[in-house]
Image (cartoon, rainbow, N blue to C red):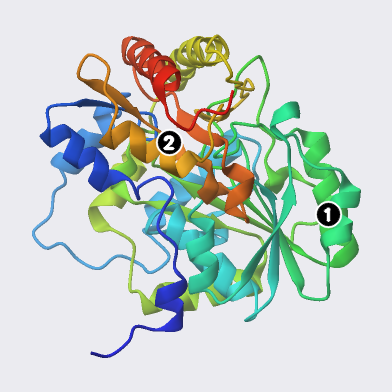
Amino acid sequence: MPKISQKGTMLPASAIRKLVPYADAAKQRGIKIHHLNIGQPDILTPKGAIDAMKNADMSVVEYTNSAGNLSYRKKLAGYYHKHNINVTEDDIIITNGGSEALQFAFSVCLNQGEEILIPEPYYTNYNSFAIQSNVEIKTIHSSIEDGFALPKIEEFEKAITPKTRAIMVCNPNNPTGYLYSKEELEVLATLAKKYDLYLFADEVYREFCYDGKKHFSVMQLEGIEQNVVLIDSVSKRYSACGARVGAMVSKNKDVMGAAMRMAQARLCPPYFGQIFAEAAVDTPDSYFTEVAAEYNKRREFLVDAINKIDGCFCPKPTGAFYTMIQLPIDDSDKFCQWLLEEFEYNKETVMLAPATGFYSKPEKGLKQARITYCLKIEDLQSAAKCLEEALKVYPGRTN
């Protein structure tokens, strides 16, 4: 039998999805699963965007422009202007989700073997995109004790080598929920300028900020316009994860020209997804106000509930709808699998994402897990109760 490639062997399983077979088996046994493992909102998708897709007037489902429909890119540029991000339709390439935008950015900005610096913990799938693009992720450790604030500039400078080509942040952050401030991003801008590095920013959660904090985009940083590449997506903004429409945004014409050649090779972004996404731009601000308020209620409840469980610690996130939790356990992979295979409380259990997959070295995440507060509060109440009861009887509890 022929062997698969080295790259195929290296690709990691998603920390978020790798336990799905165990969850499916539990459901077959009649166990209700509370999915705190995946950022799949239960918030209703804007009806106007769904109706636009349903009512699309067409006789042929054609290819679209490789960069995305011009009408959508113009409208999306208007959306960015509302957020003080001054770009035109020519600075935007529509992609098959934010994932493809990341693959484009990694591939056209870095050579084989070059490095991207990322604060950890970080979104697990960045590993796969890096491997597919033949580049390496190097990490700067951030701590749960201070809520995963940006590490000091000295830590970044110590990690920079001749191979370093880019710095990347997710803001607000997945998996930590940390919202980087303008001042923190200016620190990264200083580094990007000093060492002539790209600054990548995954900003798909910009609508969801709490405690009166406001999102500041890397596209608003001054003096490094040619260094910045923005990654975006409609998935979480409009509760439309299945639309698979994202965007790569940059004022660097060389970068965008190279990305366009990659875009041409894959032909075009989704026809129906773009119809949906273009209509979604018209979603009123009241939608986001209501959604952010709902997520805030869930955040307040879940953080408080986790911190009341003996041995647990949960920092309070200020953005997105995730947070990392510290648990009194021996091994988060074993614990999360045990929850699905061997534990139930009133025919229910909870599914978490083990934190081992969010760190460069799995052992750093042995006692942590990522959770999301995408579920209704009554489901979060049940999930928290399941976790509390599980920790009372887990064989690998450490205190």
Label 2 sits on residue: 335
190 or 377: nearer the eye? 377
Q: Amino acid at mark 2?
A: Phe
Q: Quadrant of residue 226?
A: bottom right
Q: Secondary structure at mark 1?
A: helix
Q: Secondary structure at mark 2?
A: helix
The quadrant of the image that shows the C terminus is: top right
Using the image, determine if residue 203 lies above or below residue 270.
above
- How many angstroms separate mark 1 from mark 2 (CA)? 33 Å
Residue 304 percent location from the top left of the image? 55, 10
Q: Badge 2 local density, few (<14 within 10 Å), some, or many (20+)?
A: many
Left or right, 80 with respect to 390, comes to right
Residue 129, how many percent across, how many down? 50, 65
2 lies left or right of 308: left
User: Would you place residue 282 above or below residue 5 in this image?
Assistant: above
The residue depicted at 53 percent of the width and 74 percent of the height is: 133
Q: Quadrant of residue 256?
A: bottom right
Tell me which label, 1 or 2, sits earlier in the chain: 1
Q: Quadrant of the N terminus?
A: bottom left
| x, y percent for residue 333 | 45, 44
Q: Is residue 38 visible?
A: no
Report whether 249 appears left or right of 159. Answer: left
**Residue marked by disc 1:** 156
Q: Residue 104 in the image: x percent, y percent? A: 51, 68
> Viewer-proximal residue, 28 or 391?
391
Q: Nearer the viewer, residue 398 or 302?
A: 398
Mark 1 and mark 2 in contact? Answer it, CB < 8 Å: no
Question: Is residue 41 at all visible to an observer of this figure?
Answer: yes
